[in-house]
């Protein structure tokens, strides 16, 4: 069965430093997508970055990059030059084909606190 | 322009009541979803509709009934509310492909007393 795991319930980082949020997944399907979302304290879900299982290069979006290691089934999010506004809950998610359609399942999240 | 909007933002009600949450998207997406986020922030898919057709129905009590009058709207009706239904309910939409991100509404915080 497909599964997504975030082992860090909480993380601290100093402002302007880089931080890596861990995500591992389990699927036997060759085709899948990996997503990261940010949920600030205001509650909305914000899409950050996507990595496809066949993508050769690691995805990058501004200060966000995805360290995709397919053989290890990991898709860690790297945030460079952390800002106070990065303090939020971060969710890793796996999209895969389940039956007639595809599903997006979420990890349990990592709460990131950026300290001044 | 709000891409995915859901109403109401907050819903406080008593056990046993029936309530509805409405969702609309103006992104032209074919697929819409309901997710439930519990008190530990875990997000779980409940339902998914593609072009008004129900395509995902996770193990959700049948007190929950989604309805999609057209592909831009997906509503959630909950009968006989229970304390355990208290959560944040998110509506989302996407195109169907594996690489398409879900766009979420701002959530409806349901509190059952």
Image: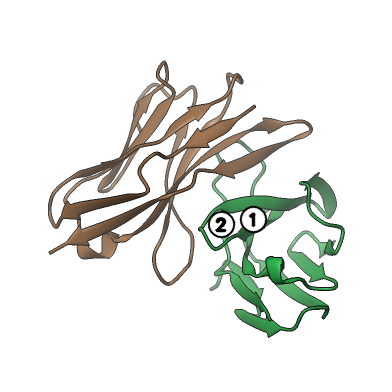
> Which of B65/B15 is in front?
B15
Pointer 1 with pointer 2, Cβ within 8 A: yes
Residue sitting at x 83%, y 78% = B16
Rendered-image quadrant of the C terminus of chain A: bottom left
Q: Chain of mark 1?
A: B
Q: Position of residue B69 (x, y in %)?
A: 85, 65
Q: State the scheme by which the image is colored.
A: by chain
Q: Position of residue A36 (x, y in %)?
A: 43, 45
Rendered-image quadrant of the N terminus of chain A: top right
Residue designated by label 1:
B93
Comes first in the chain, label 1 or label 2 = 1
Chain in green in the render: B
Chain in brown in the render: A
Residue designated by label 2:
B103
Mark 1 is surrounded, within 10 Å at the Cα level, by few (under 14), some (14 to 19) or many (20 or more) other residues, namely many
Q: Quadrant of residue B75?
A: bottom right
The label shown at residue B106 is none
Q: Is residue B31 left or right of residue A76?
A: right
Q: Secondary structure at mark 2?
A: strand
Q: Chain of mark 2?
A: B
Residue sitting at x 82%, y 80% = B17
Q: Is residue B58 left or right of residue A70?
A: right
Q: Is residue B45 visible?
A: yes
Q: Quadrant of residue A114?
A: bottom left
Q: Position of residue A115 (x, y in %)?
A: 16, 61
Residue furthest to the bottom? B13
Q: Is residue A71 left or right of residue B16?
A: left
As measured in the structure, the alpha-carbon distance from the residue carrying label 1 to the one carrying label 2 is 5 Å
């Amino acid at each position: 069965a497909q599964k997504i795991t975030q082992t860090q319930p909480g993380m601290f980082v100093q402002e302007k430093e880089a931080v890596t949020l861990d995500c591992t997944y389990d699927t036997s399907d060759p085709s899948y997508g990996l997503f990261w979302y940010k949920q600030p304290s205001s509650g909305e879900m914000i899409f950050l970055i996507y990595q496809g299982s066949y993508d050769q290069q690691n995805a990058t979006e501004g200060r966000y990059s995805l360290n995709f290691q397919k053989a290890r089934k990991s898709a860690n999010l790297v945030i460079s030059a952390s800002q106070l506004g990065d303090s939020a809950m971060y969710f890793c998610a796996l999209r895969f084909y389940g039956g007639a359609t595809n599903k997006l399942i979420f990890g349990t999240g990592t709460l990131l606190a950026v300290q001044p | 322009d709000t891409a995915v909007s859901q109403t109401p933002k907050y819903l406080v009600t008593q056990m046993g009541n029936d309530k509805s949450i409405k969702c609309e998207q103006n992104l032209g997406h074919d697929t819409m979803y309901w997710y439930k986020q519990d008190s530990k922030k875990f997000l779980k898919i409940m339902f998914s509709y593609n072009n008004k057709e129900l395509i995902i129905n996770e193990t959700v009590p049948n007190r929950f009934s989604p309805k999609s009058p057209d592909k831009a709207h997906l509503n959630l009706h909950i009968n006989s509310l229970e304390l355990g239904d208290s959560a944040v309910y998110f509506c989302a939409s996407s195109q169907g492909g594996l690489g398409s991100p879900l766009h979420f509404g701002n959530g409806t915080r349901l509190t059952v007393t």
